[in-house]
Image (cartoon, helix red, strand yellow):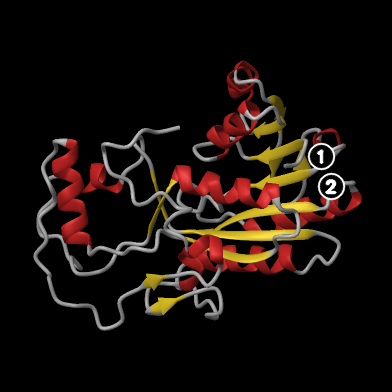
Amino acid sequence: MSKTVGVLGCGWLGFPLAKSLIREGISVRGTTTSQDRITDLEAAGIQPFCLQLTAEEIQGPIASFLQGLDALVLNIPPGLRSNPETRYTPKIIHLLDRLEQSDCKRLIYVSSTSVYGNKQGSVDEDTPPEPDSESGRQLLEAEQAVLSRSGLKTLVLRFGGLLARDRHPVRFLSGRSGMQNGRDPVNLIHREDCIRLIRAGLQDPELTGLINGVYPEHPVKSEYYTREAKAAGIPPPQYEDNAQPATPKIVGSNHPLGAQKAFLRGIYTFDRSDL
């Protein structure tokens, strides 16, 4: 395992990742875009840095953040929901330029299975992506940018729908009626499993390329969300459309880590503990 790890983006995924690394005695530097979050990072034992990536520049002490890092986990989503005009790829390119000037040559980039779009049917790492959203298109551009830097040992992790106790889709679907696409399969991954995959990449610096991070079982939405709602004690969503999709989207993995049920603990249920 790397001795000093940088987590660029200490949010919903990056913050518990950083804390899990600290518990193993690893020195962690973490970034936030808000000065108000500095004390939270410090209280968790994370060396905090306030950095802001923009399409024009990197604002903040990026050189100090990168100096002496053994590995960097880049966990910055496009953020197009809050700002549809965001130009994401230039942000990543600015960071890559600075990273190549540093001594840190190990990069783990957190991406998304949205690069496959919603109409490609069964896909894996060998499937050429066909994104059908602006977020997916910009993520694919960013993936191509990070993988094109020959001086870096880069691992790209494409995670499916993210969930945990504090972020489960059933919470937003509870009680809704007239839901469509009830026979579509789910492509989900729990936050704990995301962290397990990232930590595997930190333990093996030679692990490069692409890995899809999605649990290898894909129950249909109507059955899965009904079960999870009952487990949580909340009203289940009501699905009307039970027609089998013509090309059900199922995200799989050809990589030993991405395909192992024994490695990925499974789709979240409400009797599981959280990090």
Q: Residue at x 14, y 76 (%)?
A: 243
Report the Cα–Cα distance between label 2 and label 1. 5 Å
Q: Earlier in the sequence, mark 2 or mark 1?
A: 1
Which residue corresponds to mark 1? 69
Instruction: Verify CB contact (< 8 Å) between mark 2 and mark 1.
Output: yes
Q: Is residue 48 above or below residue 110?
A: above
The secondary structure type at the circle numbered 1 is: loop
Is 248 above or below relative to 157?
Answer: below
User: Which residue carries the number 2 mark?
Assistant: 104
| Extreme-front residue of the structure | 262
Residue 26's spot in the image, x, y percent? Answer: 71, 31
Residue drawn at x 33%, y 63% as measured from the top left: 217
Q: Is residue 62 left or right of residue 25?
A: right
What amino acid is found at the position of numbered circle 1 in the picture? Leu
Q: Residues within 10 Å of mark 1 (few under 14, many from 20)?
A: many
**Image quarter of the N terminus:** top right
